[in-house]
Each structure stands twice: as C-alpha cells, then as structure tokens.
Amino acid sequence: MRDPYSVLGVKRTADADEIKAAWRTKAKSVHPDHNLDDPSATGRFAEVGQAYDVLKDPDKRRRYDRAADMHQTIMQQRESARQAEERAKAARANAEKVMEELARANAQRAQSQAQAQAQSQAQAQAKAKAQAQAQANAQRQANSAAEPAVEDAEDMVERIFGSGDEAADAARDKAAAQARAQAQQQAQQQAQQQAQAKAQAKSEARPETAATDTGAQAGDDSAAKAEPAPKPPLPLQAVELVASLMRRWRGVPPEKAPDLTAEVIVTLDDLMAETTVPMHLADERDVWLPLEAGMTDGHVVRMKGQGLKMPSPIARGDLVVTVRVARHERFRLEGFDLHTVLPISLEDAVLGTETQVETPGGKVPVAIPAWSGSDRSITLEGLGIANGEGGRGNLVVELRVVLWEKPDEKVTDLMKHMRHGLYV
C-alpha cells in the first residue's frame, strides 16, 4: 500500500474533516461505475478506501505516522551511510592514487641514483684500468729498451695476467729476490772467469810488455763489468715463472660466485612457533631455514655462504630465500596482523551482543556493538605475529551478518514494511 496521505491527496497535518472530504471526492472520481473503460478503477477505489480506513482512526493513524517516521529515519540513515561510504571510497581511491604516485616517484628516483652511481663506478673503473694499462705499457717499453732480447719471468707474468698490487707482492717477492741475487752473483763470477780466460788467450797469442798486458787486462775487466749480467739458466727461469704466477694469484682477492635465489612456503603455525623448516635446492642440497621474529609473507633472508659452490679460489655465493606463507583456513596474514571473519546473526548485528572469537592461542571474548554491519571490523591488539621489535601485530575481526537457515515470517513482514512503507 502506498502512503495514504498521498493517495487521498492531503497533507499530514490535515484534520478529520479534510480527510473525510478528500476521501469522498477521491472515491467519486475513481468509482468503477464512473470508470467503466478503466480496468484499474476497482483497484484504485479499494486503495482509496484502505487509505481512508487508516487515516480516519486516530490510533491507526498514529501508529502509521510513527512507522512512517521510523521508516523515513531508516532511509535517511541508509542514505547518509551510503554517502559516507562513497566519500570514504573516494578518499581511499585518492589515497591509493597518491601512494602509487609516491611509490612511482621513489622508484624513478632510486633508479636514477642507481644509474648515476653505476655510471660513476664504471667511469672510475675505466679510468683506473687506463692508468694501470698506461703504467704497464710504460714499464714494458722501459724493459724492452733496456733488454730487448730476453723477457724475464716477471715481465712474462705481467704480460699474460696484468699488473698486480706491488705493495702486496713486495713481501712475497723477498724469497725470490734472494734467489735471483744468488743467481746473478754466480753469473757475474762466470763472466769474470770467462773474461780472465779471454785475456790470457790474447796475451799468449800476442806477447807484449807487462805494462801493456796489464792495460789490456784492465780494459777487458772494465768491458766485462760494463756488459749486462746474463739471464739465469732455463730451469731457474721456470722456477721464477711459477713463483711469480703463485704470487699473482695470492695477491688478488678471490672472486665471489653469484647468489642463488630460492623460495620456501611455510605454514602460519610454523611462522608463529618460529621453527626451522627444510628447503630442497636445485643443486640437490637440503638447507634448513630458521624462522625468526620479524618474518612475514614476502620476507627475504640472505644465508651467507650457502649459494653456488665454484672451484677455488672463487668464494661461495649467498643463498637468498623469499618466505611465502601458505593460506590458512581461518586466518589471513597481512604484514604482522592476522585477519579473521566472525559471522553474526541479524538480531546480534542490530542489538549488539557478547560472543567469542577464535585466535591462534584459543578463544577470547569480544563485544559486538549495536547496529554493526558487515563493513565493521574489531581490532584486538597484540594477538598477531611477532614483529621483531619486541611487540606483536593485531588480530582484526571482520564481522559478517548472516541470516537464519530457515525463513522467519516476522522478519519477512518487517522487511516488507521497510520496503513498501506498510504497517503489518
């Protein structure tokens, strides 16, 4: 039934006489005998009679006015709630948009900084490499100009493997330097013996005075001293080559193998109990990961020295593990907070109640405020997972209003009244 005031065409402040006069006028105009061609005349006539029946009785009229006012209040509250929800939704959308813009700007800034840092590092490395190459070329040119015929062990190693850290090699070169000094001393002794033999042979082939012999011998000795010392024999050169190669290898710090990435799926119970979970890697190894406070879904753990194993002297890389929390049948993990759904009945949602909610540690009491809809959440502090800073996250209880398993006539009549404005 529609609003009786609108059916009769009177205001809500109309008195009994105005209502009666309006009913008579309306009844005559919609009477079926006067509207034979209108099939809806009978229904309209009955509606006019029902409206007059409600408004002519002061008690019925009072109850209808009260029900209408309550219905109007409910509709206004619903409209206000709808508008508030729209405003909240728009605010959330604006906030998400702002956060996305901030995140995009931060990502671009970080990328620009990383590119600039990488470019500066590359330029510095290129400059250092060019300087080292120039020093090596200058050293090789000086060595070539001094001794163009023979290449010693140090030059051979530097030509093949590049120059090393001279400060680091100085201590390691001490033993080899002593060996080279002994070899050079022996070579000088052999050169002196050869020069003496050569001078004696000349004196026997061309006899002269003692003074002349002495001058010739002195000249030969000075010539022998002016000649560069001969290189060590081949076995000693091989020994120095191996020794220099070992010094180069020991002076350069070992490289590190690339990191190995993996992903492990853990249960919420294991994460809260902070147990140790196994992982089977791609290289057929089993590694145990200890779960600690502060870990949550998406947490990244770096395990030193558990990555790829490479031949010596390359150091072993790290194992980078991403923790993923499996879906739980009762709880949903967001950061360090736990979310759960609590179903409540329609009467508890309207009137409020005291009930219990399931937590990881057991059931705890919770108060449901009156007029709580499915858009309301109740936060229980300190019932989430450990955040690694001495505290814990929260348990967020999301309310869900559910109906009874079987239809209820009283609730159905009430809903009809709220929809159509009828008083039952």
Image (spheres, rainbow, N blue to C red):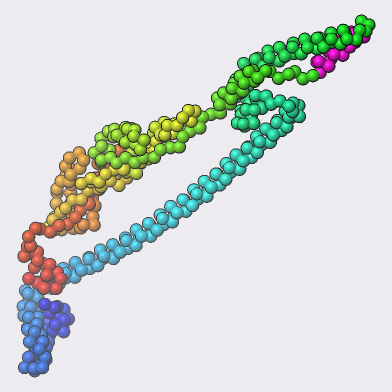
Q: Position of residue 161 (x, y in %)?
A: 60, 31
Image quadrant holding the C terminus, namely bottom left
In terms of image quadrants, where is residue 260? Answer: top left
Q: Residue at x 64, y 40 (%)?
A: 127
Task: Tell me if residue 316 can be seen.
Answer: yes
Q: Position of residue 237 (x, y in %)?
A: 64, 20
Q: Residue at x 29, y 34 (%)?
A: 278
Q: Position of residue 49 (x, y in %)?
A: 7, 83
Q: Residue at x 25, y 63 (%)?
A: 81
- Residue 109, above or below 186: below
Taking the magenta stretch, the answer to whether it contains residue 158 is: no
- Residue 415, above or below 154: below
Q: Residue furthest front?
A: 205
Task: Tell me if residue 20 can be seen.
Answer: no
Question: Which span is picked out in magenta?
Answer: 212-226
Q: Residue at x 22, y 48 (%)?
A: 340
Horizontally, residue 250 falls left or right of residue 37, namely: right
Horizontally, residue 308 falls left or right of residue 368, namely: right
In terms of image quadrants, where is residue 301? Answer: top left
Secondary structure predominantly adopted by residues drawn in magenta: helix
Seen from the viewer's position, the closer of residues 354 and 8 is 354
Image quadrant holding the N terminus, namely bottom left
Seen from the viewer's position, the closer of residues 279 and 311 is 311
Taking the magenta stretch, the answer to whether it contains residue 215 is: yes
Q: Position of residue 130 (x, y in %)?
A: 65, 38
